[in-house]
Image (cartoon, grey):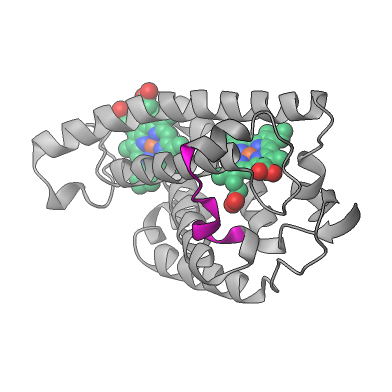
Amino acid sequence: MSKVKVWDGFVRSFHWLLVIAIATLYFSAEEGMLELHFVAGFFTLALLATRLIWGLIGSKTAKLSSLLHSPVAALKSFTQANHNAGHGAAGSYMVLAFFVLLLVQLVSGLMTSDDILTDGPLVQYVSSDTVDFAGWLHRLNFDILFYAIVLHIVAIVAYRIAGKNLVKPMVTGYSEQVASTATVTKSPLLAFIIFAVCLLIVFTTWGKEPLSYLLN
Ligand code: HEM
Ligand code: HEM
């Protein structure tokens, strides 16, 4: 098998920035540092929005359409090694689940209030019942997200024990365990430009206040 580039620079940056952002979101919520929580939340919103756009126009292995596999293919992938570039069939379900969980977490956060001083930016537009529901969902969904992360890490370790190192490609971009040498990645430049634009939008609007609080 030859060495092939499987993950472009944006997908890799997305992954590791997401890990840092979620750790920051958890820590800031636990410590009651809601300005930091909001800044990390808006950062995650820009990150996920870019990843979803890149899922439409980006590299072959970043495409959302490449994540769609039949449940039969997912079951088979537990017994057959995946020598194709990109997520395996079962892994794709995990990735889709992460995207949905993150969207629910972000949207519910925007409508959550700490009932004291700090309101998500959409709180003013919805009823108090919706705010209560969003807060409940924000807490429940985080628990589900947490178990999904544990499962994700257990799966990565299980693959490692079975002889497949998935972490190295997510760090370097390259895999030595792919059968075809066809090019499957694009330059990530456009993705980084889209990310910069998304960051600019969130931090000149909703994110302006908490960011200036943190910087002062
Ligand atoms: C907050 C914790 C984490 C979250 C939310 C998370 C989420 C994700 C997501 C969404 C993907 C898909 C990437 C994409 O296509 O854009 C992914 C892939 C991956 N993650 Fe994580 N991850 C987390 C922690 C970790 C950790 C700690 C490791 C390493 C030990 C890791 C290793 C990987 C690897 C190797 C892949 C690629 C899997 C494959 O080859 O199909 N992740 N993760
Ligand atoms: C993926 C992104 C996010 C994660 C992982 C996350 C995680 C959490 C966690 C773990 C809590 C503590 C829940 C508890 O008390 O048990 C929390 C609380 C909170 N989050 Fe988020 N959050 C995210 C995004 C957001 C966003 C974007 C906003 C709003 C801009 C937000 C607003 C809040 C508020 C206001 C609270 C306090 C609720 C209370 O005091 O009961 N969150 N979040």
Q: Residue drawn at (34%, 59%), measured in percent from left and top? A: 206
* Residue 173 appears in view: yes
Image coordinates of residue 72 in percent, x first then y, are 51, 36
Image-quadrant location for residue 196: bottom right
Image coordinates of residue 119 in percent, x first then y, are 26, 43
Looking at the image, how many numbered discs can be counted on the residues? 0
Q: Is residue 66 magenta?
A: yes
In depth, the one of 9 and 108 nearer the eye is: 9
In depth, the one of 159 and 168 nearer the eye is: 159
In the figure, is residue 105 to the left or right of 64?
A: left
Q: Is residue 11 above or below residue 129?
A: below
In the figure, is residue 155 to the left or right of 25?
A: right
In depth, the one of 213 and 57 nearer the eye is: 57
Image coordinates of residue 101 in percent, x first then y, are 41, 39
Q: Residue drawn at (84%, 59%), measured in percent from left and top? A: 4
Image-quadrant location for residue 209: bottom left
In the figure, is residue 174 to the left or right of 52?
A: right
Magenta residue span: 62-71
Q: Is residue 166 magenta?
A: no
* Residue 20 appears in view: no
In depth, the one of 204 and 193 nearer the eye is: 193
